[in-house]
Every structure is written in structure tokens, then in C-alpha cells.
Amino acid sequence: MRVRQLLTGIALGATVLVGGAATAQAAPAAPAKTAPVAAATWQWTGEYYSAKSSCDARRSYFMAASNVYNYRCVSSGGLWGGQVYAD
């Protein structure tokens, strides 16, 4: 009779453990935090050149930044000014 009580106790304990594990797994996962999305805009670099080729040569320097998505040279008052598309 003691063996039967022991087996019943083990079975009951296993049921509680399995039920607790199932409850813990059923809990919804916490939502992942994301950084706020900023809108990218065209911004002047503040550098001006007398030749477009000089302006174009600076492209790789500005494109190395992680928040810069594009670079262009714009004619402005007889000079070439650099603009970056960045957030």
C-alpha cells in the first residue's frame, strides 16, 4: 500500500510540475523595444567646392557614417555644395 501512495504522490507532483511549466510557457513574450524612427532629410554638409569633381571626391567620407543614406553635389552660387540624405 505504501508503494501505491508513493506512486500516487509522484504522479500528482509531476502533474503540478508539468502544469506549472505549461503555464510559464503560455505567458506572452514581452514586446521588443525599438528605437523611434526619425525621418531622413537632405542636409547641407557645410562644405563648398569650386569644382564638381572635388565635391564628388568627398562622397566616400560622408557615406561612411551610419546615418547617411545618400550624398549629392548641388550647384549653389557658382560653387558646388555637398548634401547628405541622413536622419
Image (cartoon, rainbow, N blue to C red):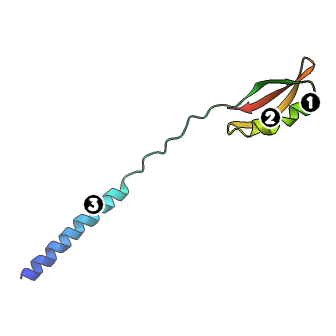
Left or right placement of residue 63 versus residue 10 in this view: right
Figure check: 31 above or below 15: above
> Which image quadrant for residue 76?
top right
Q: Quadrant of the N terminus?
A: bottom left
What residue is shown with label 1? 52
Q: Earlier in the sequence, mark 2 or mark 1?
A: 1
Q: Quadrant of the C terminus?
A: top right
* Residue at the (90%, 21%) spot, across then down: 79
* Residue at the (66%, 31%) spot, across then down: 39
Nearest to the eye among marks 2 and 3: give it: 2
Left or right placement of residue 13 versus residue 45 in this view: left
> Which image quadrant for residue 83?
top right
Residue count near mark 1 (Cα–Cα under 10 Å), binned few <14, some 14–19, many ≥20: some
Q: Nearer the viewer, residue 86 or 80?
A: 80
Question: Where residue 6 sits in the image (x, y, percent)?
Answer: 12, 77
Q: CA distance from mark 3 to mark 1?
A: 69 Å
> Which image quadrant for residue 67?
top right
* Residue at the (55%, 37%) spot, across then down: 35
Q: Earlier in the sequence, mark 2 or mark 3?
A: 3
Question: Where residue 9 sits in the image (x, y, percent)?
Answer: 14, 72
Q: Secondary structure at mark 1?
A: helix
Residue type, mark 2 in image: Tyr
Question: Where residue 33 sits in the image (x, y, percent)?
Answer: 49, 41
Q: Earlier in the sequence, mark 3 or mark 1?
A: 3
Q: Secondary structure at mark 3?
A: helix
Residue type, mark 3 in image: Gly
* Residue at the (76%, 39%) spot, across then down: 63
What residue is shown with label 3? 20
Q: Nearer the viewer, residue 80 or 85?
A: 80
Residue type, mark 1 in image: Lys
What residue is shown with label 2? 71
Q: Are marks 3 and 1 in contact (CB under 8 Å)?
A: no
